[in-house]
Image (cartoon, rainbow, N blue to C red):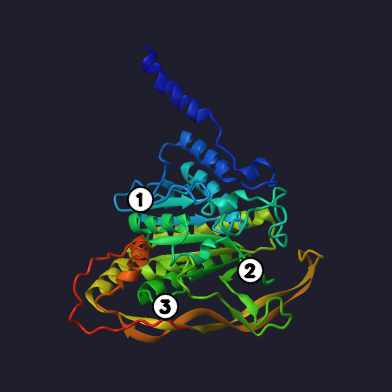
């Protein structure tokens, strides 16, 4: 009789237990989460709904070099053929909005608040830079309105900027991410940040993968996604635009252009483009309040997920076609790229009032300026992809682990092939 009652009692207790609140919610936005607090929150969610599962890529590191745990969670879809999406937050420990917004979002999904997203299979990593997440310091990023606890450090414990490590894969975090890409193979990757500099009129800026070596069809779809999301959020009163800064100098009172960042695949939000996958960079506006940045980040992510759910078949077809084209033909890859103008756009230029610590404390005014918007790249100096690559045995022990981390097959060679050989010479 007791055995029959226990499951019912357990279910009743789970239903009556209140949903957990995030650290900002519990502290009236006076603090941000540590890694252990993120884990405690997600564990509490799992007690409410067992569908939420810990996620660890096969063969991936489980901790950083400093011993901090690398934690992620998966919310599988009940759809037989779901669209897989990965959401990354806090790669820079001082840009905490995504970390908090994603905890809120997972809770809302478990509460059934977004049934339209049921076809998505989500993996969420709220505190990717575990070292930086826990290095809370009120003196870090003092130019942004922060919680009293302070925010984390940009780099990991060894001083590496993890958002510059995607190709060399020096950090355990990066090898974890690459193992996730190889095993989970998400159709879309979102990377959540906060801006650094320009005073503009957007509450959030975004970017697709900017690399020029990926499939053109995937690249077009990536920009269509973000353009549609921008329209959706504009209707909600949340102005967004392609990520960039006024130039040629930051905080120039008379800018002549708006320019994005580099197209290097070492950036996490650029890297998926090399694998013919969608990528989305989110940059909350640094001068907005801490609660506002969290809310705007969550709204942007939700709009992106909504778009992905609606266009699921198109995304799958485009990426499948891109993968098949790569195998079938010998595509061309650019040896370099060039930033190009996409349009002339009317920007809001804020004339700021700074305090002694370079914190925005007011505005002298705002004015509209129409500037060329350089927010994309085109490839230059294209060459045919070779049938294979040969690695000098003297360097194989260093090169092979990196190539394999990226999912590339490395075969032992015993004889020099008879096919014509080209040589790679490192240069600028």
Q: Position of residue 296 (x, y in %)?
A: 60, 58
Say which residue appears at 67% left-offset and 70% top-offset: 197
Tell me the CA gap for discs 3 and 2: 26 Å
Local secondary structure at mark 3: loop
Compared to 2, does 123 lie above or below?
below
Q: Position of residue 14 (x, y in %)?
A: 48, 29
Query: Who comes first in sequence, dot 3 or dot 2?
Result: 2
Q: Are marks 1 and 3 in contact (CB under 8 Å)?
A: no
Local secondary structure at mark 1: loop
In the image, which is nearer the foreground, mark 1 or mark 2? 1
Tell me, yes or no, if residue 276 can be seen here.
no
Tell me the CA gap for discs 1 and 2: 41 Å
Query: Who comes first in sequence, dot 1 or dot 3?
Result: 1
In the image, which is nearer the foreground, mark 1 or mark 3? 1
Q: Position of residue 343 (x, y in %)?
A: 54, 83
Left or right of 80, for residue 351: right
| Number of other residues with Cα within 10 Å of mark 3, as a class: few under 14, some 14 to 19, many 20 or more | many
Q: Position of residue 416 (x, y in %)?
A: 20, 77
Say which residue appears at 33% left-offset and 49% top-offset: 79
Q: Which residue is mark 2?
A: 202
Left or right of 323, for residue 344: right
Tell me the CA gap for discs 1 and 3: 30 Å
Q: Which residue is mark 3?
A: 212
Q: Are marks 1 and 2 in contact (CB under 8 Å)?
A: no
Query: Who comes first in sequence, dot 1 or dot 2?
Result: 1
Q: Which residue is mark 1?
A: 59
């Amino acid at each position: 009789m007791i055995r029959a009652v226990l499951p019912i009692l357990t279910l009743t207790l789970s239903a009556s237990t209140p949903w957990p609140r995030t650290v900002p919610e519990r502290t009236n936005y006076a603090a941000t989460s540590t890694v252990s607090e993120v884990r405690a929150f997600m564990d509490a969610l799992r007690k409410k709904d067992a569908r939420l599962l810990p996620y660890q890529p096969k063969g991936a590191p489980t901790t950083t070099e400093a011993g901090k745990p690398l934690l992620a969670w998966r919310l599988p879809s009940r759809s037989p053929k779901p669209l897989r999406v990965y959401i990354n937050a806090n790669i820079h420990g001082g840009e905490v909005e995504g970390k908090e917004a994603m905890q809120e979002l997972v809770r809302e999904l478990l509460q059934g608040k977004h049934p339209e997203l049921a076809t998505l299979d989500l993996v969420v990593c709220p505190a990717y830079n575990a070292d930086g997440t826990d290095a809370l310091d009120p003196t870090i990023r003092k130019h942004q309105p922060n919680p009293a606890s302070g925010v984390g450090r940009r780099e990991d414990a060894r001083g590496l900027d993890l958002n510059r490590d995607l190709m060399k894969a020096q950090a355990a975090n990066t090898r974890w991410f690459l193992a996730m890409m190889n095993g989970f193979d998400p159709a879309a990757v979102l990377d959540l940040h906060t801006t650094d500099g320009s005073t503009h009129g957007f509450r959030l800026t975004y970017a697709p993968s900017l690399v020029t070596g990926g499939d053109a069809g995937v690249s077009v779809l990536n920009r269509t996604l973000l353009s549609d999301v921008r329209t959706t959020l504009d209707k909600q009163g949340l102005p967004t635009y392609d990520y960039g800064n006024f130039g040629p100098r930051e905080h120039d009172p008379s800018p002549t252009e708006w320019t994005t960042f580099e197209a290097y695949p070492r950036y996490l939000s650029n890297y998926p483009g090399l694998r013919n996958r969608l990528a989305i960079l989110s940059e909350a506006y640094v001068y907005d309040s801490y609660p506002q940045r969290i809310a705007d980040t969550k709204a942007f992510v939700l709009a992106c997920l909504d778009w992905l759910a609606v266009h699921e078949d198109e995304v799958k077809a485009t990426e499948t076609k891109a993968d098949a084209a790569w195998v079938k033909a010998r595509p061309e890859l650019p040896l370099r790229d060039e930033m190009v103008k996409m349009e002339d756009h009317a920007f809001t230029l804020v004339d700021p009032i700074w305090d002694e610590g370079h914190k925005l404390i007011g505005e002298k005014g705002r004015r509209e300026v129409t500037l060329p918007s350089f927010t994309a790249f085109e490839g230059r100096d294209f060459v045919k992809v070779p049938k294979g690559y040969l690695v000098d045995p003297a360097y194989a022990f260093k090169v092979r682990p990196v190539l394999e981390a990226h999912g590339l097959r490395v075969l032992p060679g015993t004889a020099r092939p008879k096919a014509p050989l080209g040589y790679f010479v490192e240069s600028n």
